[in-house]
Amino acid sequence: MSADAVAAAPPPGFFSRLADSEEWLPRILLAPAILYIVASVGGPFIAALVYGLTDVSISSTAVHFVGLANFRSVIEDPGFHRALRNTLFLAFVSQGLVIVLASTLAIALQRDFRGKWWVRLLILLPWVAPISLGSIGWLWMLDSIYSVLTWMLRWAHFLGPWDRVAWLGRPNLAMGSIIGVQVWRTLPLATVILLGGLSSIPQDIHDQAEIDGARFWRHLLQITVPLVLPIQLVAILFGFVFATTDMIVVWVLTRGGPYDTTQVLASMAFFRGIDGGDLAGGAAIALFLFPVLAIAAVVLLRVARRTEVT
Amino acid sequence: MAIVETKALRKEWGDHTAVDGVDLAVREGEFLVLLGPSGCGKTTLLRMIAGLEKQTAGDIVIGNRIVNALPPRERKIAMVFQSYALYPHLTVAKNISFPLRAQGMPRAQIGPAVEKAAAMFGIERLLHRKPRQLSGGERQRVALARAMVREPDVFLLDEPLSNLDAKLRTSARDELQQFQRKLGTTTIYVTHDQIEAMGLGDRIAVMSKGKIRQLGPPQEVYNEPADTFVAGFLGSPPMNFFKRGDLLIGMRPEDLLPRSAYSGGGGDKLVTVKFRVGRIENLGADNLLYGSLTDLAPKERFIIDVPSAINFPVEPGKDYDFVIKASDVKFFDAQSGVRTSPKPFWEKS
Ligand SMILES: Nc1ncnc2c1ncn2[C@@H]1O[C@H](COP(=O)(O)OP(=O)(O)O)[C@@H](O)[C@H]1O
Ligand SMILES: [Mg+2]
């Protein structure tokens, strides 16, 4: 009897052994994601690296290894300098604004009020709309003749009835407009991430701070902000990388104009490499910020881990 | 040090009444325990006294001032939460000094004050650590140190020992009581644990469903319960009840002794009951006998707690005579549950 029972227990099949394997199961489950990332990110990235070191272009099939020549010529190009400055300016100013606005919004939205759910939804909408559509919407709003903004400014008597504003036609205004759209675009995600961070702080901590006598600013700066900082850093990292690598807003609104004053690295790489056919030059420009962004990512993630709470 | 009073204090959440007209007067320097089952409104009452929750109606008086309109920081109270609510990103030293910095104490005085508080609770060597590097008992001490460092008029403690393991809880209870005696600060302590309440309180306020059912010294609340709720809530195992006419009779399990083991003495009038043993549970120090009173209430379950020190062999299924002092038999109105004067049923027969 007992011998039969032992014999009757079947050896575990291949798949059930696999499902129990701590060694192989995670690898197999992760494999599709890794393959996808390698194919969609790694492939183009390596292609760009290779392009950057050769003289590949659309007009010729001959490819020669040229070392760092592309990077050297890019660095000597004054247009590149301006694009680099614009990129960093755009990223820092827009993300600075996003931090302040997202914190304010998140703290305001954290309170309970009627219709909170709808307000949150409205705020998140810019993030779910495709970025190109959003930008085209802004293109209309910033039109030199039909601009809603101009109309509102006239109505509020900031402008005379016949004044016009070339929102995208004057260098400073164009840059301001791009920053504005970039803020509009990244604010929702930053706000939602911050809201998540805020609601992860136990109510007891806030009550304790109140009991301990902390007023608004002390409470905010010494309790709330440090506790959401790790999460906030992640939001900043995303926003910063997004702002430095995005070209759609610039491309739709100004195409880098007027006279290249709003050109950023991503748009410049596109114009030179794809529109201009100089694949090698475009790749060199596109790769230029990679080390900077990689270092920024590592630094932010380390800081985020150091300040981790509980 | 100050007295704390609540006058007809109410709190309603929608149509649910959490605190239902509480009149409480805590004496100066007193250790008052709010005892009641979970959900009876203890925390809500404490949070209203702290100013964290706005009362629906009624007044709160702290140190002869009506503090209804004052925010927590102006009520001169300190509170310790069940979770301890230590600031996770600050070191122990910064946690303890936070209330001092918030009230604008000069920097030069903060260091010594923190050291004094830390020394009092024996946590000097933890000052540079973060809360996550502390054990439960250490966290509790830090929370207490932070509460007392600015010398409040009133301590409010919400189940501060419930996150500790049983052994630590006993020693922490002793310490807490010593600190309170030493500081002499008026203290309101919330717990659902009757043993904690009996051991700690100068007086106990027993709460149920948002109301205070009885307020008095532990022994009085235990020995002279005002109603069946208080009688049943204090004591473990709980008081036995059985119905007789329009009365409920209550007898505590430990008040009954085997007649053969009763050594007499005293002029106490004794009542004899017949008890049939059903099941015996040996708890080490005590033997719990489950059964029924064959002559008084044969249908109702009855528990007797016999100390193991009394050598009294029993067998299931047999009847034994037990005695109880007449003064230990409690009488309650069967309708309202309120205590009534004794109506000795044993004298007629
Ligand atoms: N913020 C709140 N909103 C609604 N109901 C609450 C809130 N806080 C407590 N209550 C209710 O009030 C009653 C008393 O709660 P509480 O004071 O926490 O009880 P205890 O501390 O005695 O366990 C409970 O029924 C609880 O559900
Ligand atoms: Mg509670």
Image: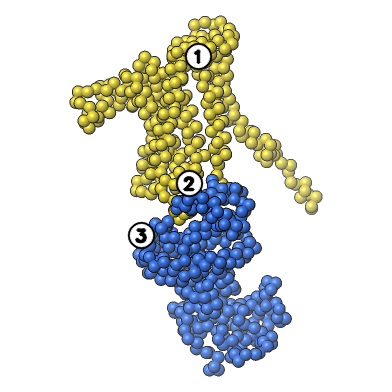
Q: In this rendered view, identify the residue nearer to me: A300 or B104.
A: B104
Q: Which residue matches tag 3? A: B69
In the rendered image, is residue B149 in sight? yes
Q: Which mark is residue A223?
A: 2
Q: Residue at x 52, y 19 (%)?
A: A288
Q: Residue at x 66, y 39 (%)?
A: A19
Which chain contains the residue that carries disc 2?
A
Q: Are marks 3 and 1 in contact (CB under 8 Å)?
A: no
Instruction: State the image coordinates of residue B156 (x, y, percent, origin top left).
Output: 49, 62
Instruction: State the image coordinates of residue A116 (x, y, percent, origin top left).
Output: 37, 45
* Element carrying mark 1: helix
* Amino acid type of the residue tagged 2 in the rendering: Ile
* Amino acid type of the residue tagged 3 in the rendering: Ala
State ligand 1's quadrant.
Answer: bottom left
Q: Are marks 3 and 2 in contact (CB under 8 Å)?
A: no
Q: Check chain identity for marks 3 and 1: say if they share one.
A: no
Q: Check chain identity for marks 3 and 2: say if they share one.
A: no
Q: Which mark is residue A75?
A: 1
The quarter of the rendered structure image containing the C terminus of chain B is: bottom right
Is B61 located above or below residue B260 in the figure? above
* Element carrying mark 3: loop
Q: Check chain identity for marks 1 and 2: say if they share one.
A: yes
- The answer for how far apart the CA atoms under marks 3 and 1 are is 66 Å
The chain whose colour is yellow is A
Q: Residue at x 50, y 88 (%)?
A: B343
Q: In this rendered view, identify the residue nearer to me: A91 or A114.
A: A91
Which chain contains the residue that carries disc 3?
B
